[in-house]
């Protein structure tokens, strides 16, 4: 059965994809740093929720974050797993970590909001 958490995860994955796809447009007004690193932040954010969706509430947030970070950093360091062309920049690793950290914050925040709404507060 699909629950609210799975719907949330899918919507947040789509948000990450939308940010990735709009990075060129956003960089016109926000600058070159946006073009260079928004993709890393957006993909890392989406990967966290993809791992969360696949785990189906069996993993703690810290484990989710480590798995997501491992996936995106491995992708970065292996030049796209040898399948995709990837331009390596050491700040990409930081941007990936920021994306996962942002995803953790959103996960915690949305879980607390959900918990409060169930309590009727």
Image (tube, rainbow, N blue to C red):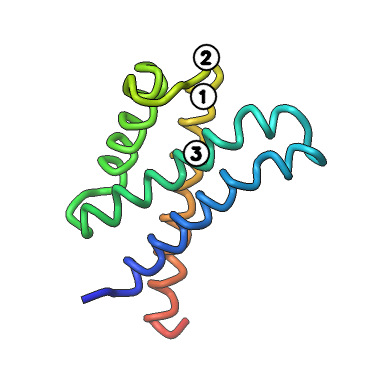
Which SS class for mark 2? helix
Q: In the rendered view, does 11 fall on the left or right side of 52?
A: right
Nearer the N terminus, badge 1 or badge 3? 1
Nearer the N terminus, badge 3 or badge 2? 2
Q: Where is residue 89 in the image (x, y as percent from the top left)?
A: 54, 15
| Residue 82 versus residue 120 in the image, above or below | above
Which residue is depicted at the point 30% across and 52% down? Answer: 52
Mark 2 in CB contact with mark 1 (< 8 angstroms): yes
User: Cα distance, mark 2 to mark 1?
Assistant: 7 Å
User: Cα distance, mark 3 to mark 2?
Assistant: 15 Å
The residue indicated by pointer 2 is 90
Q: Position of residue 95 (x, y in %)?
A: 53, 29
Which residue is depicted at the point 51% across and 24% down? Answer: 94
Which image quarter is the N terminus in? bottom left
Which residue is depicted at the point 56% across and 19% down? Answer: 91
The residue indicated by pointer 3 is 99
The residue indicated by pointer 1 is 94
């Amino acid at each position: 059965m699909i629950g609210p958490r799975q719907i949330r995860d899918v919507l947040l994955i789509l948000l990450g994809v939308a940010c990735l796809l709009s990075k060129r447009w956003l960089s016109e007004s926000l600058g070159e740093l946006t073009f260079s690193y928004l993709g890393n932040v957006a993909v890392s954010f989406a990967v966290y929720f993809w791992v969360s969706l696949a785990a189906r509430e069996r993993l703690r947030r810290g484990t989710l974050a480590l798995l997501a970070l491992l996936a995106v950093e491995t992708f970065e360091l292996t030049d796209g797993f040898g399948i995709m062309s990837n331009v390596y920049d050491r700040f990409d690793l930081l941007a990936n970590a920021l994306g996962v950290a942002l995803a953790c914050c959103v996960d915690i925040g949305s879980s607390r909001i959900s918990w409060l709404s169930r309590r009727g507060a």
